[in-house]
Amino acid sequence: MSLLKGKTALITGASKGIGKGIAEVFVKNGCNVAFTYLSSVEQAEAVENELSTADVKVKGYRSDASQFEAASQLVDNVLQDFGTIDILINNAGITKDTLLMRMSEEDFDQVMTINLKSIFNLTKAVQRTMLKARNGSIINMSSVVGIKGNAGQSNYAASKAGIIGFTKSIALELGSRNIRCNAIAPGFIETEMTAKLDEKTVQSWRDAIPLKRGGSPEDVANACLFLASDLSTYISGQVIQVDGGMLT
């Protein structure tokens, strides 16, 4: 399959986890991939080496998407190296989980800045290129927590709910120029991070999901592939839950 042949995607936070899974599936489908990382230098180099082929260009950029100027500079650098950006995947995010009574102002601000403001920064930086091309697909990574909330995650839930509102607004703003904007809301996805958790706890989470398993980064990546490709040219402003039926 080469659903994205000749296209270029910019993926934030792709040195591991869901972001890396998206990069892998996109490369398999003929897509050139520019990706960002912040602290995982060795992992980013490994992704670059692992995914680059004779047909597909893959390059990592150390960049903090939550900084407005850095996001703008990143887009300039990617355009210089790749010539175009057809797909933007805003995937970078963090958690600082704790109950509201224990949450510091810094815990709240940091999660909002990295999870939500980074999406504003990069979408704004990329839109000029997409407007000129009169084409583009923007995919924002929300969460089921942004839809239903979660105790101990008020900062994370607020940021992920904000992403949904932003996504729907951008779909309305840019639709007339053939630029689509959608969100994906993953449920429980098993990554390197969840592998460190207590197996009994993880199993209880799996049991509570109708499909009786956690999702994989590839499950999220396949939804991204659909939204990035020409299979979804009439889909915009939507939130696709990749959650095994958790929220129905």
Image (cartoon, rainbow, N blue to C red):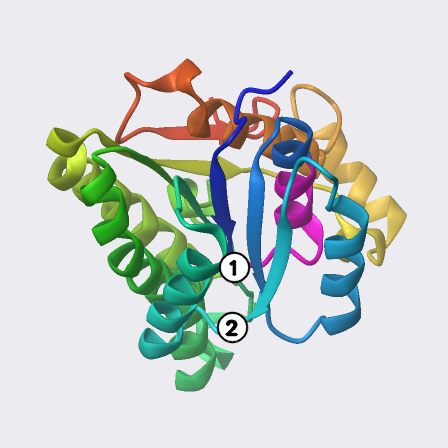
User: Tag 2: residue type?
Assistant: Ser
Q: Which mark is residue 224?
A: none
Q: Helix, strand or loop at disc 1?
A: loop
The answer to whether residue 122 is left or right of residue 169 is right
Verify whether residue 20 appears in magenta.
yes
Q: Mostly what secondary structure, the magenta segment?
A: helix
As drawn, 42 above or below 27: below
Residue bearing mark 2? 63
User: Tag 1: residue type?
Assistant: Ala
The answer to whether residue 26 is left or right of residue 73 is right
Image x and y of residue 50, in percent: 81, 49
Tag 1 near tag 2, CB within 8 Å: no
Q: Helix, strand or loop at disc 2?
A: loop
Q: Quadrant of residue 210?
A: top right
Residue bearing mark 1? 92
As drawn, 132 above or below 75: above
User: Which of 101 and 26 lies nearest the eye of the viewer?
Assistant: 26
Which of the two discs, 1 and 2, labels the residue nearer the N terminus?
Answer: 2
Crowd band around label 1 with a 10 angstrom C-alpha radius: few (<14), some (14–19), many (20+): many
